[in-house]
Image (tube, helix red, strand yellow):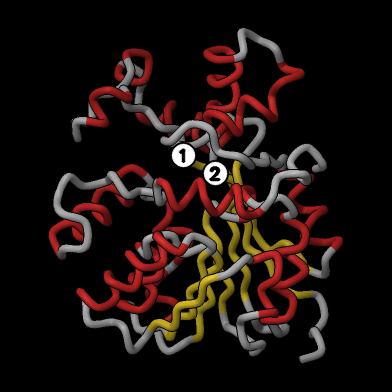
Amino acid sequence: MAFFESVPIEQVRDFWNRRPCNIRHSPRPVGTREYFDEVEARKYFVEPHILRFAEFPRWRGKKVLEIGCGIGTDAINFARAGAWVTAMELSENSLEIAKQRARVYGLQDRIRFYCGNAEKLSAFLPVEPYDLVYSFGVIHHTPYPERVIDEIRHYVQPSSTVKIMVYHRYSWKVLWILLTYGQGRFWRLAELVAQHSEAETGCPVTYTFTKRELSELLEDHGFRVVEMWVDHIFPYRILDYLQYRYMRIWYFRWMPQPLFRCLERRFGWHLCVTARARVQHAM
């Protein structure tokens, strides 16, 4: 876990400020309702397992803390389902778009936004218990993921649920990156995955986890794993996808859907875990 510890958090912030996650999911003017509608439709079309994982309707009337809200797709859906949402984000540019999104949908009264480093969450976010702490595809991009897990303990009680998605090491995507860009140079795997893990190349920090590593990380910091599963293989040709066309790569195009789903459940890129605190943290 030490490969990225020397990366300054400012470098991570600058990367996401240059290109907020999913910012190009629509060609419409950024900040318009049409833009946000298309971003959401595309995100959940490509990653439908998010709906299963987040369980938006389940949190109606509950308090939800999202760590790393990006441009706000999931935060908006928690609020739309009736949750009271607190959303934090490292990237100022991403957060401004998320705030605009809340205004566009008239949900600004249901979402509180904070900007800061999740490794130091309690330094700027008032400590209070939440029913759900949710983080999808975020903590693997910070130099010290274990510090974020420690911070989460300040915001949970025994009845709280924690849902986290991180990248899965034993995945189709890692193999594809290794063969495509690394020519099999597995000793450079951490560097290669970081370089090519996102749509914008050159991400400064991208950890990957095995199921065992993620379980140990959570258990070592006072959590009990309730459920863990993998999902998501991106099957589309990149050049077509950039033009908003969904043409599968030839070997996925002819693969029977049951076989493809089996492959996703075994070698998916997204490692999704649901956990609970083992003991109540002193507030």
Position of residue 264 relative to residue 125, above or below, is above
| Residue at far top of view | 183
CA neighbours of label 1 inside 10 A, class few (<14), some (14 to 19), many (20+): many
Q: Position of residue 273 (x, y in %)?
A: 63, 56
In percent of the image, x 63 and y 80: which residue is there? Answer: 124
CA neighbours of label 2 inside 10 A, class few (<14), some (14 to 19), many (20+): many
As helix, strand or loop, the secondary structure at mark 1 comes to loop
Q: Position of residue 84 (x, y in %)?
A: 43, 86
Question: Horizontally, is 76 left or right of 263 in the view?
Answer: left
Q: Which mark is residue 270?
A: 2
Question: Horizontally, is 62 left or right of 41 in the view?
Answer: right
| Residue at far right of view | 220
Circle 1 sits on which residue?
Answer: 232
- Position of the N terminus by quadrant: top right
In percent of the image, x 82 and y 53: which residue is there? Answer: 216
Position of residue 35 relative to residue 102, above or below, is above
Q: Position of residue 69 (x, y in %)?
A: 46, 64
Q: Are dots 1 and 2 in contact, CB under 8 Å?
A: yes
How many numbered discs sit on the rendered protein? Answer: 2
Dot 1 or dot 2: first in sequence order is: 1
- The answer to which of 77 and 159 lies nearer the viewer is 77
- Position of the C terminus by quadrant: bottom right
**The quarter of the displayed image where residue 119 is located:** bottom right
In percent of the image, x 64 and y 58: which residue is there? Answer: 227
**The quarter of the displayed image where residue 237 is located:** top left
Q: Position of residue 143 (x, y in %)?
A: 71, 50
Position of residue 36 relative to residue 151, above or below, is above
- The answer to which of 93 and 49 lies nearer the viewer is 93
Amino acid marked by disc 1:
His
Separation (CA) of disc 1 from disc 2: 6 Å
Amino acid marked by disc 2:
His
